[in-house]
Amino acid sequence: MKNKGFCDLGFAKLDLDRLRRRGFQEVIYCPGKTKEHLKKICREFIKNKQDLLLTKLEKGTFASLKKIFPRLNYNPLAKIGYLTKTRKRLAVALKGLVAVVSAGTSDIPIAEEAAVTLEVMGNRVIRLYDIGVAGVHRLMDKIDLIKKAKVVIVVAGMEGALASLVGGLVSCPVIAVPTSCGYGASFSGLSALLTMLNSCSPGIAVVNIDNGFGAGYFASLINK
């Protein structure tokens, strides 16, 4: 089936044509896949000279894959595994800067998922963490850096107000990422999601709860 742009493994149909169409190869979402499935998928992508990016990858599963693919890298905070054909991809960055901002320390894992995705896709990234609305002076201390970015990703749990605040201060697109961080009435990120969707600041796009990868991918498309 490779002549049709995909490879049929029976349990998965790998989109080998996505790199040509979208500028980046198919990304592997790991939950729900067995270790054997992941091994076969990774092996096929490598066979077809494509890079690997594995999201929501647990540490134990990474250790199992590392034995077979020794060049596979892992960021434990982001729960992302990645393997590039050459290290040059990470060094040849796009001109535009992407700022990844987190409201709190508890939001960092999702922010890191966005940041690592951006870096693997060749973007320059600046991380600005724990500068949420509970201490707005922390945000204002970094606002000049944030304004240098071509795109800003704002990662926030609780009530998710930081995206609106940043959106009102910058001229570039803002991508808001609600996280599942928060107490009972946050409803595992639903409160932050609704706040971000109802933002009165224009120029904000919202991705799904805890979807740092989606935010990073979208920001990379904008940055190109």
Image (cartoon, helix red, strand yellow):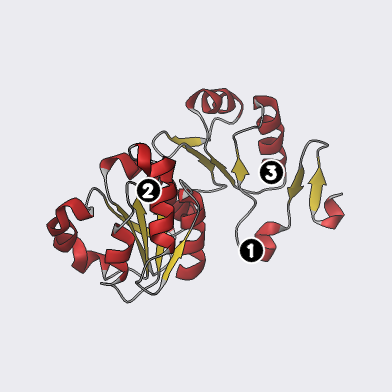
Asked whether, in this view, residue 218 is left or right of residue 109, the answer is right
Tell me the residue that label 1 is attached to: 22
Ranked by sequence position, the earlier of labels 1 and 3 is 1
Residue 109 image-quadrant placement:
top left
Q: x, y (%) of residue 130?
A: 23, 48
Tell me the residue that label 3 is attached to: 45
**Nearer the viewer's eye, disc 2 or disc 3?**
2
Calculate the distance from the C-alpha at mark 1 to the C-alpha at mark 3.
16 Å
**Nearer the viewer's eye, disc 1 or disc 3?**
1
Q: x, y (%) of residue 166?
A: 28, 65
x 48%, y 36%: residue: 73
**Nearer the viewer's eye, disc 1 or disc 2?**
2
Residues marked 1 and 3 touching at CB (< 8 Å): no
Ranked by sequence position, the earlier of labels 1 and 2 is 1
Tell me the residue that label 2 is attached to: 111
Residue reaching furthest to the front: 185
Of residues 191 and 20, which is closer to you in this image?
A: 191
